[in-house]
Image (cartoon, coloured by chain):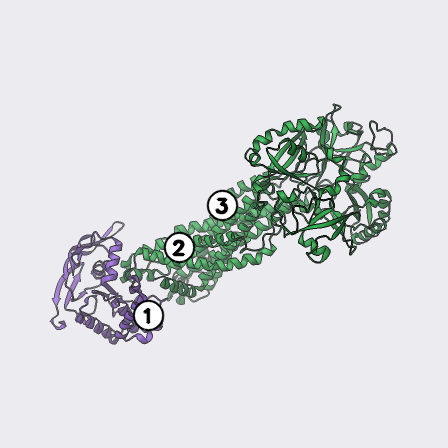
Amino acid sequence: MFNNYFTITLRNLLKHRFYALISIFGLALGLGCFAVLFLLILHETNYDTFHQHSDRIVRLTEVIKRDGIGEHSASVPFPVASALEKEFPEYIEKSVRLFNFQAPFILLSNPESGKKYNEKKLFFADKTFLEIFDFPLQSGDSKTALSRPNSVIITPKIARKYFKNEDVIGKKIKLWNDIELEVTGVFEPLPLHSHISFDFICSFPTIYKGLTRHNKNWVWNPCWTYFLLTDNGANFQAEFEQKLPDFVKTYFPEALRDLVRLELQELERIHLYSNLDYELQANGDADYVWIFKIMSVFVLIIAIINFINLATVRSSLRAQEIIVRRAIGASRQDLMAQFLVESLLVSLLAVLPAFIMVELALPFLSDLSGNPLRKGIIEPIEVSCILTLTAFITGLLSGIYPAIHLSHFQASTVFKGAFPIGQNNQFIRRFLVVLQFVISVFLLISTSVINRQLLFLQDARLGFDKEQVLILPVNWARDILYNYDSFKSDLLDSKAITSVTAMETILGRASQTHEYRTKKEKEFTFIPSIIVREDFIKTFNIKLLAGNSFTEAHLDLTWEADLNQSYCPKSDPLRGAVIVNEAYVRFKGWTPQEAIGKRLGTGHSQEKIVGVVENFHFLSLHHEITPFLFNCTLDRRKFMTKYVVIKINENQTTEAIQQVRQVWSSYTKALPEYFFLKDNLAELYTKEQRLSEISGGFALISVLVASMGLFGLTSFITEQRRREVGIRKALGACNKSLVILLSQEFLVLVSVGTIAAIPLAWWILQSWLDSFSYAVELNIRPFILAGFITTHVTILTVILHVARMVRQTPISEINQ
Amino acid sequence: MIKAVNLQKVYRSLNVETVALDNINLEIQAGEFVAITGPSGCGKSSLLNILALLDKATRGDLFFFGRNTAQMSDREKANLRKRYLGFVFQSFNLIEELSIFENIELPLAYLNIPKNNRRIRVHQVMEQLQIAHKQRAYPQQLSGGQQQRVAVARAIVTNPKILLADEPTGNLDSAKGREVMDIFSRLNENGTTIILVTHSQRNADYAQRVLHLYDGQIVTENINRLAF
């Protein structure tokens, strides 16, 4: 019997090629989209799960806040790991620290070839790195690879880049043109779903000498610190966390004890649930994964509805066959089995094109952090299984309704020769069409709102100039750091460069927090701030509300910096000068004018406010503006200068870059590296960019699939009414009235769908926008646009059929 | 073989009640050739539907091989149909997507007969009705007469005890119609019971017994001696 079902299915598909193509291609598109989103969801939710002990690994984080101001850092001070391990052996089995000097890149070279590289993904790690994490080595001994100073493990990609092959054990790489590192291992290709992304892991003892002072520093917190908990620690993590405040009281300096809170983060939750200061890389977002889940179900529902509707109308054309089968002995169960088998076969036919579509699309896909997805759909077997299972369930779902509906046809009509064709299923069909359009309109509205929000984030007025600003990382170019003033002066020799300054972190992207004394002598508060150089306010064109910029303060020597000026030579005219933002002044309860001249103490000196600037976004627009200050004080400027900022004249970019390269090479042998601030800041919104691209793509596909379904349905319905159209034409109906007659049902359905989608979209999108500190206002425009698009697509779809029909002579239609 | 007692069929739609069959009593013996005639709307098709177990009577009893069908489930009736009944329709009702061979094979498939046996039996029937050369063709490639032969082949392929035919020659010219009726005659001679619904007196003449229906009632019952 199965053969018979199979035969008749294939012949039916061939006979009704048009419907078959729409059904199969529509379902394949739906399944393909579902699979892509499923892959994305799988990728996002499986971050860091590949480690054997991932359920026992935690990261230590540090909250340093007073009155809500400060930071929640993903990294902690140097000595915390060993002290905690010593204090709580019952909870901690091992610990590992990762450290990279918080440098944008580190200079490496191949001593054999002399080639230099600026490397961004280099970390120094304790030897336990390979014991806690599962990053297997393809060569080298994992037990000793990080034991000795001056050892480095590299990825196969780096081995090829530096040495042209992967057999590189014992080869040398130079760090900062100074320290010779020996390659002691090569990693196997790294998993892509890891929040720790690296190319080099150097042994921590390599830099012990230079860090002796910091090994006892409980303030500077540059180490990403992970613990492998004991079984006891993993089972009683909350109990362990309760003991951390006492640890802080015992070990941290007195001035910090009331400010600091240590917290544990489960490794597997970092990627989706952590968005702290100084993250290793931009993480994903659990809410966005939910959006993808909803979107995947939506697109699949649209495709399934199409499939069901077309299967139903197609099967309605087979009333005669069904009744004859019943008359000659087929039971209702036989018929249901036939329709289910047919439907399953057709849905499984859609799996192959779906697989092909996903394979073709995969190279272009990346996750929320911008990392590429896994290699293919075949590799994670669960995706292939889910895809096939989904097709199977779709086939079953879409077969059930026609099977039940058609198996109820009365066999007694067989002698009358009048077979019922698609009358009883109108209500369900209409409901399904409305549901399809609710989803399509919702996705269209969402895409429009997400796009507007993205544009708003990218183009928002930040309160400083980001156009024509070139950033030059200089942290390891000592020759430049020590000769900054003449370097700056040489750059300014070019007319293409209008202004030069320097800073500690990239303005608009990140800030540090530095400790400032409150009124009490031994009490500190950590205020988000950036250490900068002269001409900063001018270069970024930040609006001054009161006082002077650093340049003007330069001339104002009427005040004296005092107290413990160990870092600050008396000859420095800017010693102790800070500029605060409006939020800081408001936080203190001052007016901008009142703030001028007020003093703030650091651990080393007594700073003075020389200017107040208008509020600006020193971090991404995900964050609210909080009190903030620029510090141009102390000789630490030299140590803290990581980026030179160059403001370039419009249309003179090439000349400016030429000048930068020329001046750079006259000062240092280090490799120049530069980027534009605007491009760098755009990366802050990678997540939103990805969401916008994904939602846009899927909204378009959903409308396409829904339209394909509508096209099939209207084709069927207009065919059904061909005779009626002929009679109406014979009686004098004009083409316009016929178009209205045939399209009004669908227009009503689409309108109902649009209206139903509006409150749903409004509610969900408003909640999404509320999650941003700064967001666009939800207005009526996206709703009108979505309604406009769907209505016009509907009209176009119907007109394509109707136009063909109204061109024919009335008699040819009546005779049909 | 078939016995109808006080059969009544009433169709109801909204407030209108139409009596299609009223107090029908009849008995059909094995091997009989019975024709049911009458004007349009007299209830011929309603009676055929009930006798063919495709429809239920509103009142009265229908006995099939001595068993009352009133309490039978749909599945039981479907089983009886596929084991004992064959159908021939005015509009042939062949399945367009199936070839001639597959159309004829279909009732055997519903009886779960093994494939080899099916093939042998279908070939026998096609030989018998002289359509073997068309086995790979599709219904729409055949003439009306050939299609009706195929329909008859499909009806008799399971060796049904009873063949029910509704205006089997209605869509055929007189020569082709005669051919079909000759086939029915031969089948009847071989022991198949035939119940024929027809307008045509010429077709009715093939039957041994002719029932005339008028307004849902059997008004006359003639025995056709020539047909014996």
Q: Residues within 10 Å of mark 2 (few under 14, many from 20)?
A: many
| C-alpha distance separating marks 3 and 1 | 54 Å
Decide if residue B71 is on the left or right side of residue A631. left
Chain identity of mark 3: A
Q: Which tag is nearer the camera, tag 3 or tag 1?
A: 1
Mark pair 1, 2: CA separation: 27 Å
Q: Quadrant of residue B149?
A: bottom left
Does residue A313 lie above or below A760 as drawn?
below
| Residue A617 percent location from the top left of the image | 70, 39
Disc 3 versus disc 2: distance between alpha carbons? 30 Å
Element class at badge 3: helix
Q: Nearer the viewer, residue B51 or A294?
A: A294
- Give the letter of the purple chain: B
- Which secondary structure, mark 1? helix
Q: Are marks 3 and 2 in one subunit?
A: yes
Residue named by callout 3: A755
Residue at 57% of width from left, 59% of height from top? A360
In percent of width and height, residue A225 lies at 66, 38
User: Is the residue A722 above or below the residue A96 in the image?
Assistant: below
Q: What residue sits right under mark 2 in the picture?
A: A399
Of the residues shown, which amino acid type is indicated by label 1? Phe
